[in-house]
Amino acid sequence: MRLILKSLILILLANAPAAFGSYSLFNPDQAEALKPELRSLFGPQSSNFRYDKRMMEAAEIAAERASASSQASCWRYVKTALLRAQIIDSYPKTRYAKEAGVELQTSFGFRKLAVSDPYKAPPGSVLVYGGPGAGHVELRSKEGFVSDFVSSKPSPRPLLGVYVKPRS
């Protein structure tokens, strides 16, 4: 399961620019082909793509920590992966997942996309959900959704927003 999770997260974060290139951190001039030992994690088509090193690192961090089911720590897992991959420069202060979108925009320069269907969110984006309690946050992958666990389906909670980090 961890191998599947790692694959999903890496694919998710590596392919973000395709749909929203100008809003993505992906820089094609700095992207690299996968090393042969990592290709098995990304699947048979992985040799056809180039990947951003920071996003691959975030994916590896999230995959190493993810569980088979929710640990009620989605926002903590996503925050840590973004920080360790140097997508953000400090640890977000918000406590609840449903507060993530506002903080990502105001403190870290993320941009909210006009996307209301989680399946249409670009791979590599951060999806923030509301609802009762703390809400939920997850990363979109090409094949699914990842936070403190992996799922092929998005959260059933109401989607508050889809966020990407623009290029500097």
Image: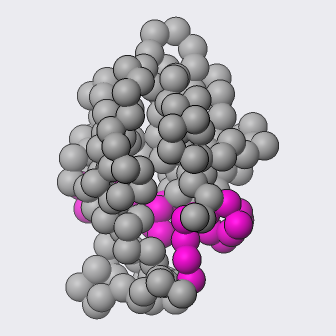
Q: Please tell me in which quadrant of the rendered image residue 154 appears.
A: top right
From this view, report whether residue 166 is shown above or below residue 50.
above
From this view, report whether residue 25 is shown above or below residue 99.
below
Residue 120 position in % (x across, y down): 70, 50
Question: Relative to the observer, which residue lies in front, 109 or 14?
Answer: 109
Classify the position of the C terminus by image quarter. Answer: bottom right
Question: Relative to the observer, which residue lies in front, 83 or 131?
Answer: 83
Q: Residue at x 47, y 62 (%)?
A: 13
User: Which range is magenta?
Assistant: 2-28
Q: Residue at x 49, y 61 (%)?
A: 12
Q: Looking at the image, which residue sits at the far top? A: 132
Q: Residue at x 41, y 50 (%)?
A: 88
Side of 67 where 85 appears, left or right: right
How many labels sit on residues?
A: 0
From this view, report whether residue 127 is shown above or below residue 31.
above
Q: Which secondary structure dominates the residues rendered in magenta?
A: helix
Side of 31 where 73 appears, left or right: left
From this view, report whether residue 97 is shown above or below residue 141.
above
Q: Can I make out residue 24 in this image?
A: yes
Q: Can I make out residue 6 in this image?
A: no
Magenta residue check for 13: yes
